[in-house]
Amino acid sequence: MTHLLTKTNGKPWSIDGFRHLIGDTLTEMGFDDYTPHGLRKNAVGELLEAGCTVAETAAITGQSFQVVEHYAKDVRQAMLADEAINKWWENRK
């Protein structure tokens, strides 16, 4: 069996070992609110917030349109909330 991801000694990563490596790396990079389990979900959110379409996001993450749409609900909610607050703030002036 060939392993694509191996440690420096050539041995394969365990699932837990690789999960910890990713988590530690994300923390070192300042992404404390990201988790290895949710990386694709996080990627979906970032791509949609950047203006990518559902189709583009699905192509990048390798997920179905349905999964991207499911994750998009949270993104849309946050974006709509931001837009509403901005409108409210502008009307106060």
Image (cartoon, helix red, strand yellow):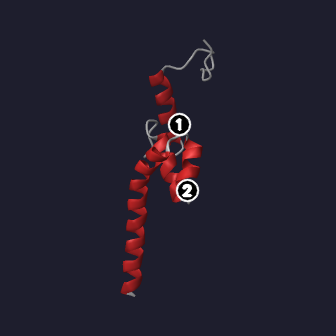
Is residue 31 shown to the viewer in this render? no
Dot 1 and dot 2 residues touching (CB under 8 Å): no
Task: Please tell me the numbered disc located at residue 53.
Answer: 2
Is residue 28 visible in the rendered image? The answer is yes
Q: Quadrant of the C terminus?
A: bottom left
Looking at the picture, which amino acid does disc 1 mark?
Answer: Thr
- The local secondary structure at tag 1 comes to helix
In-image side of 93 versus 44 (left or right): left
* Residue 65 position within the rendered picture, expressed as x and y whole percent measured from the top left: 49, 47
Q: Position of residue 91 (x, y in %)?
A: 38, 85
| Residue at 42% over, 60% down | 76
Comparing 71 with 66, the one in front is 66
| Image coordinates for residue 7, horizontal then vertical, percent | 59, 20
- Indicate the secondary structure of the residue bearing disc 2: loop
User: Residue 60's mark?
Assistant: none
Up-down: is 8 above or below 32? above
Residue type, numbered disc 2: Thr
Residue shown at 60%/18% (left/top)? 3
Q: Is residue 92 left or right of residue 13?
A: left
Distance from Cα at disc 1 to Cα at disc 2: 29 Å
Which residue is outermost to the bottom?
A: 93
All told, the count of numbered labels is 2
Nearest the eye: 29 or 87: 87
Judging by the rendered image, the residue that carries numbered circle 1 is: 25
Q: Is residue 4 above or below residue 42?
A: above
Estimate how packed mark 2 is, as few (under 14), some (14 to 19) or many (20 or more) residues with alpha carbons within 10 Å: few
Residue 41, how many percent across, how many down? Answer: 46, 44
Label 1 CA crowd tier, 10 Å (few <14, some 14–19, many 20+): some
As drawn, 7 above or below 57? above
When asked about the image quadrant of residue 16, the answer is top left
Residue closer to the observer: 13 or 67? 67
